[in-house]
Amino acid sequence: MPTVSNFLEPHETDAPDYLLMHKIVELDEYGIIRSLFHGLNGSRIMPLGVWLKADKKLVKDGTSKTSYMSGWHVLERFADASAYRDKFTKRPDLLHIVPVLVRGEVREKAHSPSPVLLADEIMFRDR
């Protein structure tokens, strides 16, 4: 059975310029990663080993009437990701923090009370 530690193994990538950050995801017993909310091309299942571009558009989230430019929600520090994950009450047994590679623009989600960042592109490491 896959575990979160599978995503922490050293991994080479052909991307010369990237950052390592953290993302909160649903991870099932088969190792399938799903985004928490909005998915990619109509699916919440996230492919591994490929760069995923955010569908950038003006959006509003459920906690604010403030608009912002969408992007992949990521966090720089594991401790911040852990504190942010603890705020979710639905499906807590499925929520995991996994490392993601991030490239392109990374910006603050200005109205968020947590240190959430918005990234243009992410990649989940292929185990």
Image (cartoon, rainbow, N blue to C red):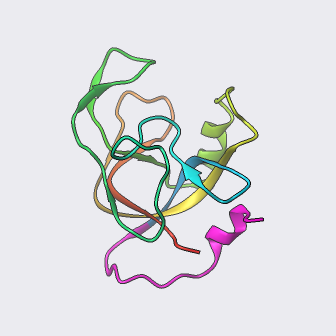
The one nearer the camera, 113 or 7, is 7
Name the main secondary structure of what is drawn in magenta. Answer: loop
Quadrant where the C terminus lies? bottom right
Left or right placement of residue 41 versus residue 89 in this view: left
The number of discs equals: 0
Location of residue 16 with respect to 55 vertically, above or below: below
- The quadrant in which residue 65 appears is top left
Magenta-colored stretch includes residue 16: yes
Horizontal and vertical percent position of residue 81: 59, 46
Left or right placement of residue 13 versus residue 95 in this view: left
Horizontal and vertical percent position of residue 55: 26, 44
- Look at 21% across and 36% down and name the residue there: 57
Horizontal and vertical percent position of residue 38: 41, 36
Left or right placement of residue 47 versus residue 5 in this view: left
Magenta-colored stretch includes residue 31: no
In the picture as drawn, the residue positioned furthest to the top comes out as: 65
Left or right placement of residue 62 versus residue 121 in this view: right
- Look at 43% across and 44% down and name the residue there: 43
The one nearer the camera, 100 or 82, is 100
Quadrant where the N terminus lies? bottom right
Q: Which span of residues is magenta-colored?
A: 1-19
Location of residue 121 with respect to 117 vertically, above or below: below
- Look at 50% across and 44% down and name the residue there: 35
Horizontal and vertical percent position of residue 94: 70, 43
In the picture as drawn, the residue positioned furthest to the left comes out as: 57
The one nearer the camera, 9 or 26, is 26
Location of residue 1 with respect to 85 vertically, above or below: below
- Look at 64% across and 78% down and name the residue there: 9
- The quadrant in which residue 122 appears is bottom left
